[in-house]
Amino acid sequence: MTVTRVRRELFPVTPSWAGSLYRKRKKERKIGLMAGLLQLLALSVALFTIPSSTDSSTLNITFQRSLNLSRKILQDVRDLLIKYKQEKIGHPSFEDYNVILSSLPCTRTVYSYWLHMQDVERLVLNAKDLHVFWIHVDFKRIDELGESQHSTMGKSMEMVSLDLRDLISHLSSQISALNSTSPDPPDVTLPHNVLNTAYDWHGKLQGYIIFRDLELYLNKVIRDFTLLKNKYRE
């Protein structure tokens, strides 16, 4: 199947020729993935309830720590994306910005709007959007481990997932420290075309899109923490 080269969401169509063995395998994987996602969604609620109260100098320190963690995640995602494109797509230099997943946060930034955002607004937006990315990354991790329990790529996805959780916890504490209420976790429901890809290629392409967009979004997160760290100097 040829992927249409227009900027649109990837909506796979179930092939009429798919055999019963393929459908059975997909059904078994879906059951396992749904069980894992239910545990994931239950755990996610706890990430937005960490209170904190601190002064300006301590905020500078915590923003620096979040900045360091964001940079680490970005590098890990870059390394993972290269490995993913090599193993799943077949070429480490593969790029395609014409396909998107509408369930992912927007990665474009309007500079004039970004420049005038309030501090809490930046943190809340990052917390909500990173939570959505975390759900997608962990879904791909479960999917990868469903194919091979000893997958090194699955382990790399797990490290990114755990670090995203830590970063979300940082954001929650920082929001509380600025005397604001931590946001409720967004109501994320993975769409049918992500949970049930009709073609194996579509599943691989979706993974590429998730890590590609996460890399782009982390660059914005790093800019936010850099700005906040400099603002809350001693």
Image: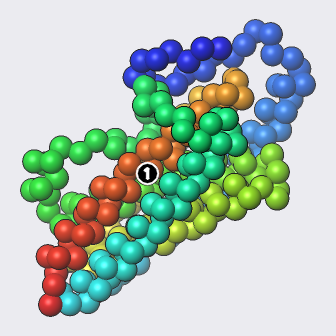
Q: Is residue 179 left or right of residue 216?
A: left
Residue 213 occupies quadrant: top left
Identify which residue, 191 or 73, lies in the foreground.
Answer: 73
Residue 159 occupies quadrant: bottom right
Q: Residue furthest top?
A: 16
12, above or below 166, in the image:
above
Q: Is residue 7 left or right of residue 120?
A: right
Identify which residue, 30 or 82, lies in the foreground.
Answer: 82
Residue 6 occupies quadrant: top left
163, above or below 197, in the image:
below
Work out which quarter of the rendered image holds the C terminus and state it: bottom left
Q: How is the image coloured?
A: rainbow
Position in image of residue 49 (x %, y %): 42, 73
Amino acid type, label 1: Glu
Q: Quickly name the residue at label 1.
A: 215
Q: Is residue 156 visible?
A: yes
Q: Is residue 186 visible?
A: no
Work out which quarter of the rendered image holds the N terminus and state it: top right
> Which residue is at 52% across, 68% downward?
163
Position in image of residue 150 (x %, y %): 82, 59
Identify which residue, 26 or 1, lies in the foreground.
Answer: 1
> Which residue is at 57% across, 67% downward?
162
Callout 1 environment at 10 Å: few (<14), some (14 to 19), or many (20+)?
Answer: some
Position in image of residue 205 (x %, y %): 59, 33
Badge 1 marks a residue whose secondary structure is: helix
Q: Is residue 130 left or right of residue 228?
A: right
